[in-house]
Amino acid sequence: MREEPESANRRILVMGIHLWILTVMFVIGAIFHYPEESLLPSISPALGLTRHALERILFLLPISYASFIFGMRGFLAATTVALAIMLPRAILISTVSRDAVVEVCAVIIVGGLVNLWFELYRREKNRTQLALQKLAVAQGELQSYLESIQKNERRLAALNEVSDVLGQSLELEAILHAAADKVAEVMDVEVVLAFLLDEKTQGLEPKIHLGVSEELVAELSRLKVGEGFNGQVAQTGESLVVKDTSADPRLTREVVRKDGIRAEIIAPLKAEGRVTGTLCVATRGPREFVQEDVELLSHIASHIGVAVDNARLYYNQRIMAEQIASDAEKEKQMRESLTFYLQQVTRAQEEERRRIARELHDETAQDLVALSRRLDIFIAGGKGLSSQDMVLLEELRQQADKALEGVRRFSQDLRPSILDDLGLVPALEWLASDLEQHFGIAIEVQVTGSVNRFAPEVELVLFRIAQEALRNVWKHSEASQAWVVLEYGDDSTLLTIRDNGKGFELPERVADLAPLGKLGLVGMQERVRLLGGSLKMLSEPGRGTSIKVVLPKQVT
């Protein structure tokens, strides 16, 4: 890397000034060393001394100055000049030549020690500066690495939130409307549109819309596959980013420009590899969507596509079940059909949760562990670092440990392995302990009767109900204590979750909770009904809330 001309000129000027100072020092030293030639009084006799040792000692000043400014080369050059000045007097003029030569040697030796000290100091300073430079680079890398992990964590947390919303109901309209609000929140956009594909007409029907006019919705109801932005995505199955719709030649409906929509991302809704619709998010102001936004929306669209397919399957199975439920045999077929559906829906949802949990554990958590270990190494080997640097490293390590704890919690929350390995009772005890530790609510688990394992989908439904109920206790009830009671009976199994919180006014039917935004409670009832059981909720203001799930023995 070539030095700038201005910087080089400044450096030459500074070096020149130092050389002039050294020259002046040596001239003054020579004058005082040879007072006979300069007609100036000698320093030593003026102080009552008979030798010129003091004049020789003065040469330590230019020798030390040259060593400090120019290093070893400066020391050698200054020593040569000092010897050239001192030796003639010591050998030819001094009456005590031997002593004078020893004094000259002593001056040179002391100057050499001073130069050695400067060299050691300079090398240590260089090592420290190099270590600080490396530390600054490492800190930048670590900070960038941590920011990347935190972004990934936020993305996974957003996916988890959307997954929770989608898992709260099996009704298509409820799923889509709840998803629209959550998508707008996690993507930070004003407009959300979801189109479902009608395979018979090859048209796209807007099923949910948020932040747009009714005129735009009506105009887009006649959209065909291949037409416009959403039609192109439905045709290709690939996500699309539009920087400015008003200036894009692919725009086919003028009402979009009239409605003020600017930047867009459109992702395909897919189920089992086929396109079932599109999900569009947009802003009315300029925005530069990045690749991370596209990936996040694509993942969300994938979740919604699976949920929509499950909801359609649920609807078809329910219609079929209602048609064949005329007698006992047909009722049995209905139950078997609904149980099969529950297995399919549960399997699809849990596979997605398991995939996210695996991604959290195998990728993000391992990266955070590696980051934390690197920070520990930096902190342990932080000799020569300032206290400010050590504090910064410690803060980075604490952030990494906190993020690691959150990622592990997300992973366990999504799919606790203890449920598969040990069964429902240990999983409920783990859930209670985990929530008690993190949220400070005392949770007691009580089990009565003869404990036995249920079918995997039944245990999973009971666990998710307990998990959702205890989350509601933490979020809404302001309770200090909760109880989870599992009773194994001869004819049925009873799961009760109750708390001592503030309670609330219950509507006449649990289904009436959906318009109030309490989709989790509605989703609990739907799953219990699919198992052939029943769910009862009791709550009064100031007297807490209780949820009771009863499953007949033939189901479990």
Image (cartoon, grey):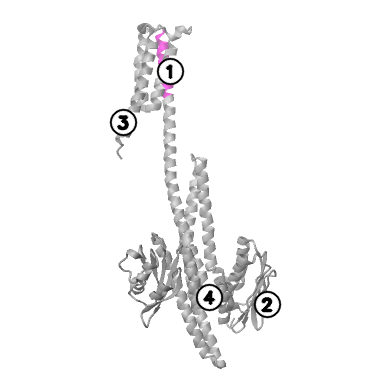
Magenta stretch, residue numbers = 96-113
Q: Secondary structure at mark 1?
A: helix
Label of residue 106 in the image: 1
Q: Earlier in the sequence, mark 1 or mark 4?
A: 1
Q: Nearer the viewer, residue 287 or 64?
A: 287
At mark 3, the secondary structure is: helix
Decide: few, some or many residues near mark 3? Use Cα within 10 Å; few <14, some 14-19, many ≥20.
Answer: few
Q: Position of residue 400 (x, y in %)?
A: 51, 54
Who's the residue at 60% across and 64% down the image? 434
Q: Nearer the viewer, mark 4 or mark 2?
A: 4
Horizontal and vertical percent position of residue 115 = 41, 26
Numbered disc 2: secondary structure: loop
Q: Which mark is residue 449?
A: 2
Specify whether residue 320 is in view: yes
Q: Amino acid at mark 1?
A: Ala
Residue 169: assigned label:
4
